[in-house]
Each structure stands twice: as C-alpha cells, then as structure tokens.
Image: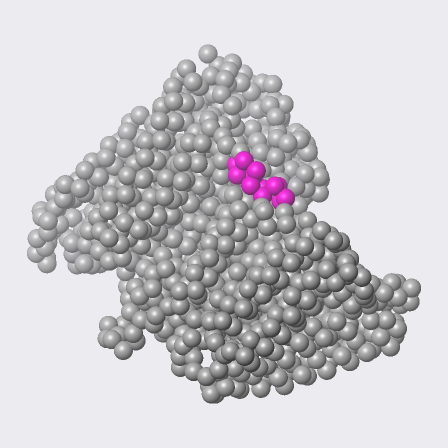
Amino acid sequence: MILVWLIIVPSIGAILAGLLGRWDARWSRRVSIVAMAINLALVLYLWLRYFSPSALAGQGPWLVELEQPWIPQLGISFHLAMDGLSLLLTALTAFLGIASVVASWNEIRERVAFFHFNLLWALAGITGVFLALDLFLFYFFWEMMLVPSYFLFLWGHERRIYAAVKFFVFTQVSGLLMLLAILGLYFVHGQSTGSYTFDYMQLLGTPVGGTLATWLMLGFFIAFAVKLPMVGVHTWLPDAYTQAPTAGTVLLAGLMAKTGGYGLLRFVVPLFPNAALDFAVFALPLAVAGILYGALLAYAQTDIKRLVAYSSLGHMGFVLLGIFAWNDLALQGAVVTMIAHGITTGALFILVGALQERVHTREMGRLGGLWETMPRMGGVTLLFALAALGLPGLGNFVGEFLVLVGTFQTNIAMAVAASAGVVAAAIYALWFIQRTFQGPNPLGWRLPDFSAREGALMAVMVAIIAWLGLYPQPVLDAAGQSLANLQRYAGQPRAETSRYVGAGVPAGPPPEAEVAALKDQGANMGRAKLLLSRTTLGSKDGSAGASPSRFGPAGTPAPTQSVVPPRTPSRGGEP
Amino acid sequence: MTLDDLLVLLPFLVLAAATVVVMLAIAVYRHHLLTAALTAVSLVLAFGSLFVVPSVASPRQVTPLFVVDGYALFFLGLLFAASFAVILLSYGYLEKQEGNREEYYLLLLLATLGSAVLVASTHFASFFLGLETLSVSLYALIAYPRLRENSTEAGVKYLVLAGASSAFLLFGMALIYAQLGTMEFSRIASAQAADGNPHSPLVLSGSAMLIVGIGFKLAVVPFHMWTPDVYEGAPAPVTAFVATLSKGGVFALLLRYFTQVDLRSYSSLFVAIGVIAFASMLAGNLLALLQNNVKRLLAYSSIAHLGYLLVAFMAGGPLGATAVAFYLVAYFVTSLGAFGVVTLLSGPDRDADSLEDYRGLVWRQPWLAGVFTAMLLSLAGIPLTAGFVGKFYLLAAGVGPGLWLLVITLVVTSAIGLFYYLRVVTIMYMRPAEEEGATAVPTLSRVGSLAVVALALVLVWLGVYPTQVIQMIQATVAGLV
C-alpha cells in the first residue's frame, strides 16, 4: 500500500495545490513541499527498513509489491513493485521535487496554483514510471507525466511554445512507438503461451523471433533514447532545457532523463536480451558520440543554460554506455551516474536559473567577475561544475569511473574514446566558471548573493553530491541486488561481450584466479563484488538467439533461478 | 406480432409515442421548459425500457426487419444517453435564441428514433427507413436558426449531399437484391455462400455503393466534404448530435452488416476500406492543423477519429468489435463534452467557434476550461481519459491481425493530432488580451454546465477504471461476432 501512497500523495498534493493556490499562492508552495517531503520520508523509511544488513538476507526480487486486477479482460493489472533501483530513483524524484518547488519560489509569480498542480502531477507520473511493473500501467504513467510537463513550459522563456511543442512531439511519437512494441510483445506472448498479459514478470523470457525482437526492442529503445536523450534524437533537448522554467528544466533533466535510463535497464535489455546485445554495436558508439558531442557543443555555447543542457547530453551518454556495456561495474556506474547527474544537473540548472533571475540574461558575454559580488553562489557553482567534470570525491566521478572500468572490460576502444569526453568536460566546465564568475566584471554587476532558502537548498545538494562521491556504498548496495536480478532476467548476455573484447577470449569457464582477482578488484564496490561472476555460458561463436540458455525457459511465467548457472555465487551463499 | 414482440420493441415505441405526445403538447401549450422536460422524460423512459427487454427475450428477431439483441440494446442505451445529454445542452442554448424553440425537440426525438432504428436493423428496408428518418430530421435541425446565413447554407448542403448519398445507397441495395434476391442481412450472407461467387460484379458494385452511402454518413475521406461546413453552420448542440448519434448509429449498423456478411470475403472492398481509413486519418489530422475555427477543427478531428475506428472495424473479431464499441463510447462522451463547452460559451448571435473566443478561458471560466482541456486531451488520447483507453484498445485490435500499415498510420497521425489539440489547450491558458471590457462573460446555463461536468467525470471514470464498461461491452457486443 505504501507504493500507492507514493503516487497518491503527489496527486492529492497536486489537486490541493491547485485549489488552495487560488486562494493564496503561498499555500500552493507549502502543500507541494509537504507532499514531496512525505514521499521522501516514505522512501527513506523503506530504504532504512530494507537495506539494513539484517533485512538483506532472504529477500525476494522486490522489497515491496502490490498487485491488483485492473482491467482483467485485457490482462492488465495494477502492479507496482519497488526494488533497490526504483527506490533510488523515487528518492531522487521526491528530493528534486522539493528542490524544484524551492527553486521556483521567486521565479513563478503568476498562476502559481496551476504551476504547482502541473509540477506535482508530473512528479506523480514520474514516480509511477519508476514503480510500475505492468507494461500498460507503465505506459499509462509514461504518458501521464507528459501533459503537465508540457504545461510547465508556459512559465518558460522567449521561445517556450516552440520548445514545448518540439518536446511534446518527440516524446509522444516515441511513446506511441513504444506502445506498439508493448502491444507486439503482448500478442507474441499471448500467441505462444495462450495467456494474454501485460505483466512484466510474465513477459520476461518471451521467446521472440530474431527480426521481430529487433523491431520490438527498437520500439522501446527509441522511446527511452528520446527521453535520455541519446545523440541523434536529442534535438529537442537544447530548446526544451533552455526554454523551460527552472523547475521544468530540473524535472526534464533531473528526472525525465532518468526515466529513459530506467526504461533501458528495466525493460529493453531484460525483455530482449539478444536483440539488445546485438544492438550494442550501435548503442555503444552512439553513447560515446553523445559524450563527445555534448561536451563539444557545451563548449561552443554562449547561453549558460544551453551550456548546461549540452553537458547533460554528455553525461547521459555515460548512462547509455554503462547500460549497453551490461556488466556489473558498468551497470553500477550507470545507476550512480543517473543519481549524481540528477543532483548535479539539477543544482546547475537551479543556479543558472537563480543567476538569470538576478541578471535577466543567460548570455555569457554579459557576465563575468560575479565572484566578487556573489562569492557563495560562485563557490557552489564551481563545486557543481567540478562535479560535472568528474572530479574525484564528488558523485559523478564514481559513476563515470565505474562506467569506464566496466566498458573497458567489454570494449576497450569505446572506453578510451569515452575517457576523452571526461577531458572535454573539464574544458567546458572550467570555461563556464571562467566566463561567468572569474575575471573582470565589465558591466559592474552588483547582485544579491544567496537567500537563506537558496543557501539551504544548495547546502543539502552539496552534501548529497559529496556523500555520493565519498561514500557511495549505500547506493551501490541498494542498486546491487536489482541489477543482479536484471542481469539474471536477461539470461547470460555477458557471454556475448567476448565479441567486443576480441575473438581470442576463451569461451570456456575463466580461470578461478581471474575470478578471484576480479573479486578483489571489486572488493571496494560492495555489492558489486557479489555480482562478479564471469560466467561465459554462451556458445563459442556467440551467435545471437541460437543458444537457448540465454533465454529464460520459453513460456514459463518468469525466468527462475534455474537459468542462473550453478557457478554464480548466490546471494545467500556469500558470508 | 405477439405481445412479446411488442414488448421487445418497447424502446422504439416509447420514442415514437413521445414524438406524438410532444407534438400535441406543443399544439396545446407552447412552452419551452415543458417541451424540453417532456422530451427528456421520454428519453429516460425509453432508456428504462431497455431493461425490460432482456427479461422478455434477447436476442429476438421481430419481423425480418429488426433484431433486438445485446448489441442493439447496448447501442440503444448509448444513443439514448447521448440524446439526453444533447437535450440538456440544447435547453440553455435555445433559451438565448429568438423564435420558436419547441419544434427543435420534436426533431431531435425523431432523429434519435431514426438512429435507434439503425442499430437494430437486419434488413435493407429498415436500414433505409432509419437512415432517412435520421437525415430528414437533421436537415431541419441543422438549419434550425433559419435567420443565420451559414446555418441555412449548411442545411441545404447537407440536404443535397445526403440526398445523393441515399441514392447511392438505394442503388447499391437494388443491385445486391437483383443478384441475391433478398434484403435480409443474414440471408444475404447465406445466399452469397450458396452463390459460390463472392466476386459477382453486381454484389461487389452494390456493396461498394453501400460503402459510399455509409461513408457519407460517417464523413470519412473522400466523402467528407460536407463535414466542416455543416459542423460550422449547425447550431452547436446539433453539431454534437451529428458528430455522435448520427455517426454512432450508422457505425453500429456497418459493423453488424459486415460481420454477418463477412467483409474479408471481399478482398477488394477490404482494401478499399483500408484506403478510406488511411486517407481519413491522414487528411483529417492534416487539415485540422490549418483550422482557426474550433468547430471546423473538431469536424476534421472527427474525420480522423472515424478513420481510427475503421482500423478496429477492419481488424474484426471479438477484440475488434469490443474496441469499436468502447471507442464509440469514449468518442461519444468526448465529442458531447467538447461541443457541450462550445454550446455553453455560445451567445445568441453566433456560436463560440473562433479560437479567439477561447483565449484565456481559464481566467474567465476555470471549470469550463478544465473540462474542455480534459475533452481535448481525451481526443488526443492522453492517459486518465477515456480516449487513452479507447486508443489503446484500437491499437491492440489492429496489432492482433497485423494491420501494421494502418496501425502505424494511426500512431503517426495521432501524433500530428496532438499539435492542434494542444494549440487550443495552450490558447486557453494564455493571458487574455488586455482591453476586454467588451466581451462580457456569458451567463452559463446551469443544466448545460451540469451535463458537461458530468461528462467530464464519466470521461475520467472510463479512463481510470474502464473494467465495468468493458465487461458490459463484452457481454453484449461481442455476442455479435
């Protein structure tokens, strides 16, 4: 029931904020903060409850689960479930929800009630996306978050309508493609097993033929790639991120981008393991292209918000890279990057928004030397710029490092190329600080520094990003088991990865020493080490779809433990 | 005719009697509220009589002309409810108008009766009679505000084109009769099977002409030319009627006919309907992009929606039939709601059909703007509304038998559709122009507002918990297949 509350609380909050705000705008803000704070408290409660060492043993795949028939005629159920991955992302949603309300405290002055209605409604939809385990329900929430986020553009900047429509059309078309893929999967599953259902756990391991699997996988992939966004389908991003109001941008970049990453993790690879791994040949270069392209274009921008927008493109490239590298380290890295990017980019957009509110321009040429007048804001911005460039000690570093290490194991060339992106990030991030806060102040800006509210918000965000950088263990712990499950659902795709390393890798069981070495290497990665199992079950030639062992058993409701090769260290077996 | 036969026909008899009663009432005492109330009560009675019928017999063939089965009962209920909503909307609208208002209700009842006859017909004769009762009443309804120029124009346009389409329909029926010697749907099916030649030119051309006639009523491309003008010219509540009851009744008949006479046996007709569906989706959505008049915009959008419906219709089978029925319910609620808002905002001189009428509506009429937003989002197929579940159903029906081209067209065109729905929505939420002392806030009809809000609630209910309605549809409609 607690999962339903996570969705109901923001929905009720939305309605209350919409109603009370007509009477007094301040109540909209208060109600919104309270609603998201309740959500955050609920998630943290779940975190503490389920991730204490004692509670970890003997746990099923889901921490909390709820299933109710909804439209039984079509095999649709109201199926919500939370695992570590969902938990992290719902926590991020609740936190960034609060941050968006705080950040728009002064920025939004008209139609306050309607603004908060949309904001909370979108947050309810996003929370639902992270929790839904029925594909119909997932699509329902996926679409539900769209309209309110479209409306948030109404409070945006000069070219808001253009940006809003572009955003909406991109996401809607890709969403409908996903719907087609969902329906295709539904019928394939129904025809092969006789039970027509949208339930994720049952659809896992549906045997889909080669070409059809690729098409269905692409339907899902495009929808998620647009949200992420991946380079190639990213053209809505600079406009949308720039034109939306601060809260809208935080929502888009901090949360909706994560729904894309989440979807890839939860649906694309587990549902179509072979098709997805064949597609990795394209996805990995696209991810690297995103990293480099984002960094390059960020460097070329003179509009500070656009700069942050393009940097976000680069960071999400790391997420895509980590997901399609599909091994323990890379996946852990992708999750940490998602969380860290949510905080960093959220903070940067809030800072840029606060700056624009003060100087009424986003043009870097008109800024400069602001440190002398706003030292606190300068310091915090510098810190988050450093986080964005991947400075060790801050959250993004952990994520990007893990992604690079993981990718290195499967595809050295891509890892090397992606590392270049880290360097490029340093250039634009420092350039950005240089042009805005350092140097002379030619226009003689005299601006108010942080208000208490902004300062408090930034203090919390700084604390989180430092915590992620210094002690990421809780996050790794939380994500670890869900990632292990996802890998299990996807069968043993890592056998495939030998193709990227090179033909010379032996397909047989790896030497025990290597496993041990890898375990040592991963010793600091906490749960990640549990997952380090270099099982290579796949056939020697690695041809996709030929080896039944990489599928779940056809037709069974859910792939069971039996697909896991006996050598995989089971969770319970680890002391 | 036994007593049971009469009992089974009770819904029709109630409606037919009601027209006489209302006519006499007008002759004795001309009073707007009284007439409207009488009409509304008779519709409620007709609706109530639907629950008497199954206790007698269902399905039951009454004369060769009618069958009263679950399918017919379901659509009768839908039509009566929709007609009731139209009356609630019309009352406030007509209050603002000059001239005689009472005959309007008479015509409305007759049109409802015509469309009710359609959903229960199993014979060309009853099909044609129902269609003509509907059409003739609509000529008068469309041109009801006879002093408005474009209403008269719309009425005449509809008269000429509907006359032409009826001619096609009759000719088609004659050709089929000439070849097969029967006008009963079930016998046509069996005669055709016995004939052994499904591609007999007479039957094929006859069926093609039937499709022309029906296509005109449904306003699908290329028989859609009248739609924008008639939608624009007709008084807003009549537009709602044309959009829903008229099309819904004909679609129910189309589905019944081509389920009994298997559509897939005529491959050329199947392809032709596919082309019609494709063209309707594309043209409807593309042309709607260019409109600055809300009624015309909704007209083009309705062309597109009928195209969507044809996709599920072509998919056939129980899933297709259920999808059609559910989408029709969703479409009825949505269209009635959308035109209901237009009706409420309309003044005595002109209907509120210009996009400018809606600028900043949320500031003047927040509830109404909310309802209109919900309706437009439902037309666009956004979750939490009936339109979302409906579109999902259509896609599911289309994907099943693998009509990929049509399904992808549906997806792409509904994305195009978003543009113009969002355009209207965005305009409602924009700041109104400053100097606006002139446009006084119109007083809203209470009954009408109530109806519109109720429709919005139904819309959300269907969007969130459609199970009950789907159950009902499966119990009734799916029996057809």
Q: Using the rendered view, name the quadrant where residue A553 is placed.
A: top right
Q: Is residue B223 left or right of residue B431?
A: right
Q: Residue furthest top?
A: A575
**Does A366 lie within the magenta span?**
no
Q: Is residue A445 left or right of residue A105?
A: left
Query: Which residue is more in the foreground, A477 or B119?
Result: B119
Residue at 32% across, 31% down: A41
Residue at 41% across, 74% down: B346
Whether residue B416 appears in this view of the structure is: no
Query: Magenta region: which residues?
Result: A68-79
x, y percentage for residue B29? 51, 78
Residue at 28% across, 66% down: B431
Q: Using the rendered view, name the quadrant where residue B429 is placed.
A: bottom left
x, y percentage for residue B206? 79, 75
Whether residue B244 appears in this view of the structure is: yes
**Does A73 lie within the magenta span?**
yes
Q: Main secondary structure of the magenta part?
A: strand
x, y percentage for residue A24? 22, 51
Q: Quadrant of the N terminus of chain B?
A: bottom right
Rendered view: B229 above or below A431: below
Q: Is residue B187 left or right of residue A11?
A: right
Query: Which residue is more in the foreground, A492 or B297?
Result: B297
x, y percentage for residue A57? 47, 16
Q: Is residue A118 left or right of residue A362?
A: right
How was this image coloured? one colour
Rendered view: A493 above or below A219: above
Residue at 61% across, 35% down: A202
Query: Which residue is more in the foreground, B253 or A485?
Result: B253
